[in-house]
Every structure is written in structure tokens, then in C-alpha cells.
Amino acid sequence: MPLAPNPHAMAMLIRKLESIASLSDEQRQAIERLPLRTHTLAARQDIVRDGDKPGHCCLILDGWACRYKLLGDGRRQIFSFHIPGDVPDLQSLHIHTMDHSLATMTKATVALIPHESLHELTLRHPDLGTLFWRETLIDAAIFREWMVGLGRRSAFEHMAHLFCELYLTLQAVGLAENYRCRLPIAQLDLGDALGLTSVHVNRVLRDMRGRALITLRSQTLVIEAWEELVRIAQFDPTYLNLERRAAA
Amino acid sequence: MPLAPNPHAMAMLIRKLESIASLSDEQRQAIERLPLRTHTLAARQDIVRDGDKPGHCCLILDGWACRYKLLGDGRRQIFSFHIPGDVPDLQSLHIHTMDHSLATMTKATVALIPHESLHELTLRHPDLGTLFWRETLIDAAIFREWMVGLGRRSAFEHMAHLFCELYLTLQAVGLAENYRCRLPIAQLDLGDALGLTSVHVNRVLRDMRGRALITLRSQTLVIEAWEELVRIAQFDPTYLNLERRAAA
DNA sequence: CGACACATTGACCAGACTCAAAGCTAGTGG
DNA sequence: CCACTAGCTTTGAGTCTGGTCAATGTGTCG
């Protein structure tokens, strides 16, 4: 597979960046010129592993991915879910050893961009450097919100919060509308993100369905009572720093 | 209070930065020339609040601080503890609205550095920009490790892990040695960091004392069995990205 | 059609929480 | 210098959220 620019692929990244900031034509073009190599992966494959020292960043073009860490005895914590346009391992640009893994959740297409090219881009375009930095800071803001969920929200509140967050993030890049979106996350993965067992996730989902808040079936999330969900989760979208503030 | 350079104060920041990277003389001097205004605060005072749009970053010169977020009903999650040399709100440089608060835990002295000056510094010294970016990325790495603790470790393991982390971070800037350090964190705050109640924190501490792992009395932490603590916590210091890797 | 992964449910269990009551301790003011 | 206070620590008893174990149902894909 060649290492070459691919404006079509980079359009995904540009769309994502424009969900948190505005880009000039020059910046867009600089991004479009980034060289990359695309790969297609099956579901549940590691892209980068804990301990690796990768030489490139991974842009997701299609499918879903997640970052996670395993404990010795198999316990797993998921840190984030990622969708097309995301660069989940941007931090590897300046932190050389991975302290967690990145894996596909569905069949996925990814573009690998050499660190070298990204370094060059941020040197030549400091504004883009700042934007990438900002991107990683928003990542951290989401981590903080997840910490609140893991430490201080009930399972019900926490899950409600996650659905609010996922919906708005998907909507911001045009992957959700009318309170409905694809959500290819198994209950086991949901549990590993929320710090719960899949059994309990199942019970909370049943409860939410019973209260006509949401339904999650055949990998499709339908939010039936957005306002109520927001209220229960005490959801405030500020931390997402979305440029076009949506339905919230 | 004047807005002026203060090399003595900046020595704290330099020491911290040198715990994660090496600095050139020129870089050190550029940092020393940053203008700042120092303040002294009582314990348990907010420095920046959720929702604020600060125009400066806060460098801690003396005392301890923490970042936290409150839920509507008073539940609190602490995200991080901060010691002299830390700039806990570096992220405010590129994320304009605070999504959490920063407060002192003890009587503290802080230096406020205008965003403007920091922006200028990072433009004139891209390497320092990168270093600050890296600093925020390590922050995020620590968040991830805390997420594992909150979601997947038992209270005992989680607390053991926190003590390992705090000890190494303090040691890296010369504030701990011989498995002993000052730790002015009340059990209630420990609970808010670990996602536990202060009652349970107390019980776990008693248990740790009983097993001759650590003692925590009069704000002093003594680690009596480092290797054992590391084993229980499954502690791996890689995520801290410390330059001089210590006792681990 | 069979296999495998995922979802669902029940019964029982445990780690952590709640509530409540004492003990300590450091800092304050007289 | 000591008494007082406020905040922090410690402990017990009882409860509850979420976990464990295990069986069964469902759906998708080769």
C-alpha cells in the first residue's frame, strides 16, 4: 500500500476538526497533502498495543474503535470510543511509549500518518499545532467527565450521560440526527467503559427501555426522551467544546 | 502585587519540567523571564471555578491543590492532586471555559502567569510549546490510569496505586525520599479522588496499616513495603513519563 | 444448518454505602 | 498557656448497588 496524499481520506479529519474550530483554505490544503497509508481491519483487532512505540498516528476513516487498558487478570477499562475522523492516538506524537491499546470494535478502515509528517505540519502551521493540542485537551476533558461517571454517578446516571455524549459527538460530524444513531457497542464493551459488568449493563438498559428513555437494539440507539435523559445525567455539553452547539 | 519576572518562582516550574525532559539554558532563561503575580491563599479556597474563563495559568509555588468537579447534589470527583511546580490549569491556554474547578488543599502560594505571555513563549520557542503540550498529555495519561482505578480496581488496589503514583511524582521533584513524604490529603478528599466514601477510605487505610504496607498519620505517608504495594496495585510507572526513573 | 458471540434472566453474594456516635487534634482566642 | 471549637478520624450496625455464577434465548455469518 502506497504512502501518498489522499484528499478524500483527509476530508474525514477536516470534518472532525471543523466540529471544534474553523479552518482556513490553506490549513485544509496542508492537511490534504499529508501522506498516508490506508489499511482495512476486521473487528476486534488491536491497531496499537500497550508498550508499543508507534511511528505514525491512526486516523479512522470508517468503523469504530476504542482505547483500553488491560489488568493482569483480564479486567479491562475502556477510555474512549472513536468514530470516523478521530485520531485516537494523537498523543503518541509526543508520548513515545503507548500506555494503553487501541483496537477496532467493528470492521474498520484506518489511515496511518507518519509522525514525521505531522511534526512538519505543526512546525509549518503553528495554528494547526495548536488545534491538534486543543484536540488532545478536549480528549482529556472527556476523560475527566468519564471519571465523574466512574467515581460519582450511579450506573443509571453514568450510562445516561454516556448516551448524551455519544449522541452529540456523532451529531457534530453528521453521523446522527433525530435522536437516532448507529451504536455498534456490545454490552460487554459498554460495561468495560462504564466500569460495570455486562449483566448489570443489560439490567440498566432494560430499565431505561422500561422508562421510555432510550432503546438500543440491533446496534441502533434511539433516544426517546432527550430532555429527561439530560436531566437524569446532569449532562452539560460544555466540556465537548463543540463548535456548532447542537440540540442540547 | 506587581506583574514581573521572578526567577526564584520559575525555578519551581523548571524543576518540574526537568522531571519530564531536559532544558537548554536558553529555554530556562525564557521561562525565567515570564511575568507573574504571586498570591497566597488559605486552605480550601477555589483558585479557578467551573465555568470561569481565566486569562492566566496558575503555577503552584508552595502547598497542595486539586482539580475537581461537583455534581448538583454535592457529590464531588477529584481529578488530580497538585504540588509545587505544577501548572494545574495549563489546559486553559487552549480551552477557554473551565469545565472543572481548581482549589487549594492547604495554605498555598501560587503564581499567575498571563496566557498572553505563555502564548508568546510557545511561539518564540516551539520546543517549549511541545514540552507544555507533552505536559498536558502526561496529565491525560494519569487520568487514564485513574479511570482504570475508578472502574476496574478494588478500593484496596486503587488506593495502593494512588500511593505509588504520589510517591514517585513527589520523589521526581525532590519532595519525597526513603519511602516517606508529606501528604496533606484528608480522608474525605482521598475518597473523592478514589470514588469512595471517607468511611471506606478509613477502613482500607486501617487494613493497609494492619498488613504493614503503609501508614498515613499526621499528614505523613510512610511506605513500609514498596515492592508489595507495587505488586498489589499492578503499578507500572511508564505512564508518568518521568525522566529519571526512580525506585520503581 | 451449525457455531459462536451476544443478550437476557434468576438466585444469591459482597464490597462499599449510610447513618450515627464517639474519639482526636490542630488551631484560635482569651 | 490553656480551654474551646471545628474539622477530621475511627468504629459499629444495617442496607443496597452492583457483582458472580449459571442457564437459556437470540441472531448472524460462513
Image (cartoon, coloured by chain):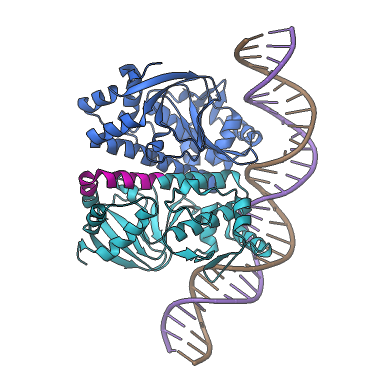
Chain colours: A blue, B cyan, C purple, D brown
Q: Note whether B170 is above or below A59 in the view shown.
A: below
Q: Is A165 within the magenta?
A: no
Looking at the image, which residue is at 38% across and 63% down? B45
* Residue D28 position within the rendered picture, expressed as x and y whole percent measured from the top left: 60, 14
Residue A213 seen: yes
Nearest the eye: D9 or B6 = B6
Q: On the rendered structure, is D29 left or right of B57?
A: right
Q: Position of residue B74 (x, y in %)?
A: 49, 54
Left or right for A106, reference B243: right
**Location of residue B61 in the rendering, given as x and y in whole percent from the top left corner:** 34, 64
Q: Which residues are magenta?
A: B119-137
Which x, y percent locates residue B24? 27, 52
Image-quadrant location for residue B102: bottom left
Q: Is residue B171 above or below residue A129?
A: below
Q: Tell me the residue at 32%/36% (across/down).
A: A132
**Quadrant in which the N terminus of chain A appears:** top left
Dominant secondary structure of the residues highlighted in magenta in the image: helix
Note whether residue A244 is visible: no
Q: Quadrant of the C terminus of chain A?
A: top left
- Does B126 lie within the magenta span? yes
Q: Look at the picture and state if B39 lies above or below A86.
A: below
Looking at the image, residue A111 sits to the left or right of residue A44; the answer is left
- Residue at the image point whose x is 54% and y is 54% from the top: B248
Question: Which quadrant of the figure has residue B208?
Answer: bottom right
How many marks on residues?
0
Between residues B46 and A122, which one lies in front from this camera angle?
A122
Q: Is residue A108 left or right of residue A33?
A: right
Residue drawn at the location 40% of the way across and 31% of the way down: A55
